[in-house]
Amino acid sequence: MLKKHSILIGISMAVSLLLIATMLYPGGSIFDKSSIGFVWSKNFISNLFAEKAINGSDNPSKIWADAGMIFLSLSFSQFFIRFSKKIPVNHAAQTIKYLGVGGMIFSFLIVTPLHDIMVTISSTLFLISLFYITVFILKSKLQLLKFFCVICLLIFYYTLYIYGSGEYTSLPIMQKITFLSIILLILSLEYFTKKEDFELK
C-alpha cells in the first residue's frame, strides 16, 4: 500500500512542509520589504529558502521549505521513473526518466544561492520530459488527460515567459498556479494511466 501510494504520500508531505514554511516566514517581498508574513500574491516560494527574510529577519521557514523540496524532488523523480516504464518506445522512455530525474536534481538546487540558473536548467529538463509525456498522451485515448497536459504546458510556458520578461507583478500568483497544476497533473498521470494505454498498434 505504501509503495503504491508513495508518490502521493511524498507530495502530500512536501506540500505540508511548504505550507508550514509559509506560516513561519517573517515577512518582506520584492514589492513591499516591510510586509508581514508570507503574502501569497506577493511572495515567491523561493523566498522561503533564504537564510534571511526580505525584511531582514532570520528566516525560520528555511529548514521546513528545504525539507519540502527534498520530498517534492524525490516524489517527482519517482514519478518519472515509474511513468517511463509505461512507455513502449525505449528512447522516449529513457528521455522521460533521465531528463525528468535530472530536472528534479536541479530543482532541489533551487534552494541554494544558484537559484536563477537552477530554475532555467530544471525547467528546461522538466518541460522536455513533460513534452514527451504529452506526445504519448495525445496518441492515447485518454481524452481528459490530453486536455490537462496541454493546459499545464501552456501555463508553465506562460509563467516562464513572465519570469523571462522581468514583469513580476503577476508572477507570484502564476507561480502558485503552475505549482498546483503540475502536482495535479503528476498525480493524474500516476493514477489514471497504465502501460496498455500506450501500446503500439
Image: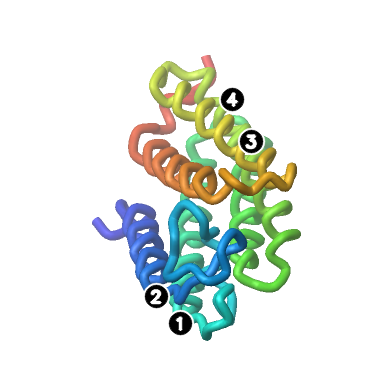
Mark 4–mark 3 contact, CB under 8 Å? no
Query: Residue 157: which disc?
Result: 3
Q: Disc 4 marks which residue?
A: 135
Residue 95 visible at all: no
Earlier sequence position, callout 4 versus callout 3: 4
**Three-letter amino acid code at the position of disc 4:** Val
x and y percentages locating residue 161 in the rendered image: 69, 38
Earlier sequence position, callout 3 versus callout 1: 1
Q: Disc 1 marks which residue?
A: 60
**Three-letter amino acid code at the position of disc 1:** Pro
x and y percentages locating residue 15 in the rendered image: 38, 60
Mark 1 element type: loop
Q: Residue at x 59, y 57 (%)?
A: 104
Viewer-proximal residue among 160 and 90: 160
Whole-angstrom CA distance, mark 4 to mark 3, is 16 Å
Q: Is residue 89 above or below residue 36?
A: above
x and y percentages locating residue 87 in the rendered image: 53, 33
Whole-angstrom CA distance, mark 3 to mark 1, is 32 Å
Query: Residue 24: which disc?
Result: 2
Mark 2–mark 3 contact, CB under 8 Å? no
Left-right relation of 53 to 166: left
